[in-house]
Image: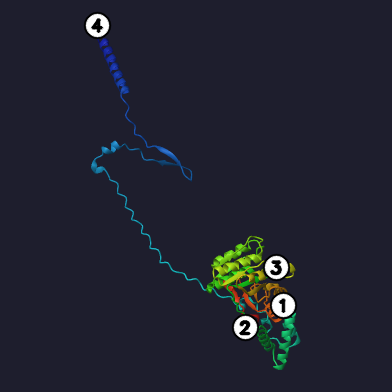
Amino acid sequence: MNALLLVIVIVIALAVVGAGLFFSRRQNAAAEAPPRPAATAPDVREVADVAGDVLVEEAPDVDPRDVADVPGDLLVEPEPEPELEAEVEPEPDAEVELKPEPVEKATFRDRLAGVLGGLRGRSIDEDAWEELEEALILADVGVPTTMAILDRVRDRAKEEKARDFDAALALLRDEMELELGDIDISLVIEGEPAIWMFVGVNGVGKTTTIGKLAKREADAGRKIVLAAGDTFRAAAAEQLETWAERSDAGFVRGAEGADPGSVVFDAVEHAAAVNADLVMADTAGRLHNKTNLMEELRKVRRVAEKAQGKVSEVLLVIDATTGQNGLVQAKQFTEAVEVTGIVLTKLDGSAKGGIVLAIQKELGIPVKLVGLGEGIEDLVEFDAHEFVDALFA
C-alpha cells in the first residue's frame, strides 16, 4: 500500500515537471521569433506659412520595385500634357504717317494788347483827349510824336465835325498809317556777296535774329555764310554755329578776343570763293554811349567793305521793351554805321510797340522786321496796317 502511494506521487511529480518544461520552451520560442514589421507612418513635417505653423503630410516614398509588382491592368498611365499652341503675334498696325501741323504765323493782333481799344464809347471832351495823349505816351510813342499826331487829329475832328470819340479814334488810325507810310521794308541784296551787318547793344537778340533770318533766306534758295564777329561774348560763336548748322550755312569764326574786323573780312573772302550770295555778320553788343566801342564798329564796316562784296544792309536790333531808350540807341548807331533798317525784337512781352512810330517819325529809318515770339516763324516783316490795327483791337 505504501509502495503504491509512492509510485503515484512520483508519476504526479514527473507530470508537473514535464508540463513546466513544455511551457518554458514555448515561451522561449515566442521570445526568439522576429517581430512583425509595424506599419510605417508617413513622414510628417512642419511647414511654416504666413498664418503660423501648419502640419503638411507628404506622400511616402515609393519603391519602384513595388510598382513593378502591380498588375498591368491596375497601372494608370499619366495623361500627356496638352501641347501649347504657338502664340500668334498680332500683325503690327499699319504705320500712319503723321503730317506736321502747320505753324501759325504770329500776328501783331496776337501780341499787342490793344492799348488804344479801351477808349471807345467816350464823348468828345478835354478829358478824353488827355486820356488819349496819356495812352499814346505810355505806348512808347514818345512825347514829340504824340503831340504832333494829336494836333493833326484835333484839327481834322473839328473840320469833319466828329460827333463822338469813336470818330476821333478813326481819324487817329488814319494819321498813324500815314505816319508810317508806304516805306520800302525789303532787305537789299547787292554785291557778290552781299553783306548784312547786325548791330545793337547787349542782350537785344542779335545772334538769334541772325539765325532766324539765315534759315529764312536759306529756305528761299540763297547760299549763306555766317560770320562770328562777336569775339568777346562767351559762347557767342558756338551759338551762331548752331544756327549755321540748322540753315545749312557756311560759318567763319576767329579765336576768342580776335579782331572782329578780320573775322568779317575772312568771312567775306570765303563767301566770294564759294560763290555764296550773302554774308550775315554778327557783332559784339556795345553801349551806344561808349565812343571807343562805336569807333570800333565803324572800323568793322570799313574793313568789311575792303573785301569783295558790298555792305547792303546795316540792321539795328532793338529790344521793344526798352521804350524810348531804343530811340536814343537808333540815333547813336545811325551816326556811327549808317543804319538802314530796324529789327524790333521781343514785341511779345510787355512792350507796347509805339517806338515804331517814334523811330520812323524822328529818324526816318524803316522798321523792317519784328520779333513776335521765340520761334523761327515769329520773325516777320513789318506790316504798318496790321500793326496799327492791333493797337486798336
What's the mark number on residue 3?
Answer: 4
Q: Closest to the observer: 393 or 356? A: 356
User: Is the residue 12 above or below the residue 114 in the image?
Assistant: above
The tag earlier along the polypeptide, 3 or 4, is 4
Label 1 Cα neighbours within 10 Å, binned few <14 / some 14-19 / many ≥20: some
Colouring scheme applied when the structure was drawn? rainbow
Image vertical order of residue 216 relative to residue 254, above or below: below
Q: Label 3, secondary structure: give it.
A: helix
Disc sitting over residue 385 in the figure? 2
Amino acid type at image mark 4: Ala
Residue 110, x across and y down, in percent = 61, 76
Measured Cα–Cα span from mark 4 to mark 1: 169 Å
Q: Please tell me which residue is depicted at 55% across the width and 65% down the height of the picture.
A: 245
Q: Disc 2, disc 3: CB below 8 Å?
A: no
Toward which corner of the image does residue 150 lie, by quadrant?
A: bottom right
Is there CB contact under 8 Å for labels 1 and 3?
no
Task: Looking at the image, tell me whether mark 1 or mark 3 is earlier in sequence order.
Answer: 1
Q: Which residue is mark 1?
A: 138
Q: In the rendered view, tell whether residue 158 sits above or below residue 324.
A: below
Q: Is there CB contact under 8 Å for labels 4 and 1? A: no
